[in-house]
Every structure is written in C-alpha cells, then in structure tokens.
Amino acid sequence: MKKKIIIPSIICLILIFIVITFLYKLSIIPHKQYTNSDFNIKTYISNIDKDNDGIDDQTDILNNVKKYIQTKPKYQSKYYNTGYPNDEYGVCTDVVGFGLKDAGYNLMELVNEDIINNKENYNIETIDKNIDFRRVRNLNVYLKNNHISLTTDLSKIEEWQGGDIIVFKDHIGIISDKRNKKGIPFLIHHANPIQVNYEEDVLELYDKEYIIGHYRIS
C-alpha cells in the first residue's frame, strides 16, 4: 500500500521539478539579477549626446527602451505608412527603433539613406523607406556600416554593456544593464505573441552561431 502511495508522489515531484525548471529557463520565473558593480565592470558612458538632452547616447538608448517595453506592446508584424508603429503593436526591430529614435537616431531616415548610398550591400530589390528599417538583415548591414562593432562572445562579459544592440540571424534586441550570476547580461526584446517578460535572462539559450552582430551606437 505504501508503495502505491510513494510511487505517484515521486512522479508528481519529478513533474513539478521539470515544470519549474522549464518555467525558469523561459524566464517566466524571475532570475536573480546582478549589475556591473557586482563584477567590477565599469559602466560605459558615451561621450556623445546626439539629441542634446543632457543624457549620453548609451544611457539614453537604454532608458528609452525600458520606457518602450513598459507600454507592453503586443506582437504583430504589420506594415505602417508612418514607418514606426503608431498603435499598440510591434516586433523585435521596433524595440531598437524606438530606443534609438528618442535618443536622436531616426532609423527610418538613417537606414534609408544608407541603402540609397550603399545599395550593393543590401539584398533589396525595391526600396521602401517605411519598412526597410524594420527588417533585421537591413539593420545588421546598417549598424555594421555606421557604428561600433564589438565581440559576439558572451564569455567576454566586460565587453557587453546596457544599451548595446545584439543581432541574431532572425532577431534583434537591446542589451540590459542587468546580468545573471555569470555576468552575462539580460536581453531586452520582443520575440513572439506569447512572451511574458520583455527583459529576460535568455542569451545563453541561443547557439553561438546564432549571434551575428554586437554594436554600440557611439
């Protein structure tokens, strides 16, 4: 009789453990957060303030991105005649777009200008200013052409700073100023319609080959 009780209990405990582990991996269960100071890493401050608001670019971008995700945008890929989404929806590139726009970098204009001047670098048949800056592959080319390229090696934790941009093969996001116990930063991004948190400890879940770019604006 005892065996009949013990075996289901063990199975139940194992299932609970698996569920908790799964939820933790997906960052649905919050992870402990650390900062640069916990790893003796000096926080990067840009010497440029593009929009002259008294806040350096790096800090400005990070602050703006955090404000954007507080609006809890819903994930949906749509075309906008305004270029930037003007409703409650958005995709991964909009996290970057709004973060930079409010720091003085209008990606809709900047990417369009770079495409016109360097069309051979872009895999584009028809230029469309309203959507080109919202495509990951175009942003990667633009960033590589115009801004600071950095390591894609996550183990070099001191080279990753809040406000940096990380590009994947089919995704993009902003590096957070929060870190996990290994010093690897959290990712601020918008990946899918069922995403619970926008700032997550998920970078280690991606294969090394999946990360194709790491950039700093100034």
Image: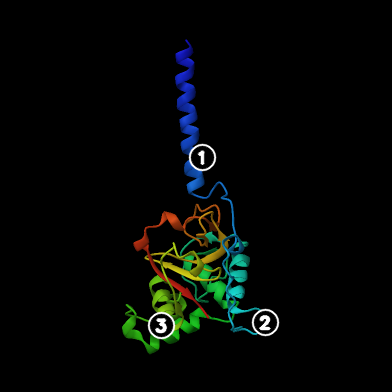
Residue lying at the far top in this picture: please name it.
1
* Residue drawn at point x = 51 percent, y = 71 percent: 164
Badge number at residue 145: 3
Local crowd size for mark 3, using a 10 Å CA cut-off: few (<14), some (14–19), many (≥20): few
Residues under labels 1 and 2: Cα distance? 44 Å
> Which amino acid, mark 1?
Ile
Q: Earlier in the sequence, mark 1 or mark 2?
A: 1
Local crowd size for mark 2, using a 10 Å CA cut-off: few (<14), some (14–19), many (≥20): few
Residues under labels 2 and 3: Cα distance? 26 Å
On screen, residue 192 versus residue 52, left or right, reads left
Q: Nearer the viewer, residue 100 or 44?
A: 44
Say which residue label 1 marks. Answer: 20
Provide the secondary structure element on which disc 3 rests.
Answer: helix
Provide the secondary structure element on which disc 1 rests.
Answer: helix
The percent position of residue 93, horizontal first and vertical second, equals 48, 69
In which quadrant of the rendered view does residue 57 lie?
bottom right
Q: Is residue 111 above or below residue 191?
A: below
Provide the secondary structure element on which disc 2 rests.
Answer: loop
Badge number at residue 53: 2
> Which amino acid, mark 3?
Asn
Residue lying at the far bottom in this picture: please name it.
117
The percent position of residue 42, horizontal first and vertical second, equals 58, 70
> Which amino acid, mark 2?
Asp
